[in-house]
Image (spheres, rainbow, N blue to C red):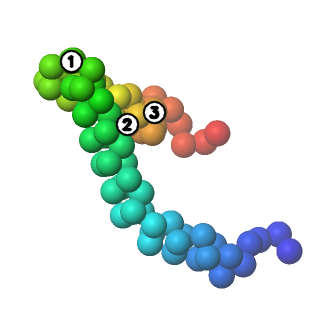
Amino acid sequence: MSSVPAWAIWSIIVPCVLLSPMLAFLLAIAVEILIGSLVEAGAPAFLAVVATGAGGLFLIRKLRPQAGASAET
C-alpha cells in the first residue's frame, strides 16, 4: 500500500474546512485583545493598530511563497 486511501484524506480535509471559521473568529478575538492591552498600557490607539498590522504582515509574508522560489523542493 503505497498510497493513502481517499477516505483518510477527506477525514482530514473536512474537519479543517468546518473548523476554519472558528479559528478565524478566535484570531479576531486575539487581535482585539492585543489592541486593547496596548491601549490599556498607554499606547495611542493608532500605534496599537499599526503594531497589530505589522504583526499580521509579518505572518502573511512567512506564509506566502517567495517570488524566486521554484515549486520543486
Q: Is residue 36 left or right of residue 2?
A: left
Is 35 displayed left or right of 23 in the figure? left
Disc 3 on helix, strand or loop? Answer: helix
Callout 2 amino acid: Ile
**Residue at 42 percent of width and 57 percent of height:** 23
Name above or below for residue 31 compared with residue 37. Answer: below
Report the residue marked by disc 1.
Answer: 43
For disc 2, the marked residue is 60
Contact (Cβ within 8 Å) of mark 1 with mark 3: no
Compared across the picture, whether 67 is left or right of 33 comes to right
The N terminus: image quadrant = bottom right
**Marks 2,1: beta carbons within 8 A:** no
Tag of residue 62: 3
Q: Foreground residue, 1 or 20?
A: 20
- Residue 50: image x %, image y %? 21, 24
Marks 2, 1: nearer the viewer: 1
Q: Position of residue 51 (x, y in %)?
A: 27, 23
Label pair 3/2, CB-CB below 8 angstroms: yes
The kind of residue tagged 3 is: Lys
The crowd level at tag 3 (other Cα within 10 Å; few <14, some 14-19, many 20+) is: few
Image quadrant holding the C terminus, namely top right
The answer to whether 40 is drawn above or below residue 59 in the figure is above
- As measured in the structure, the alpha-carbon distance from the residue carrying label 3 to the one carrying label 2 is 5 Å
Instruction: Give the percent coordinates (x, y) of residue 63.
Output: 45, 39
Residue 32 sits in quarter: top left
Q: Which mark is residue 73?
A: none
Dot 1 or dot 3: first in sequence order is 1
Identity of the residue drawn at 25% across and 34% down: 36
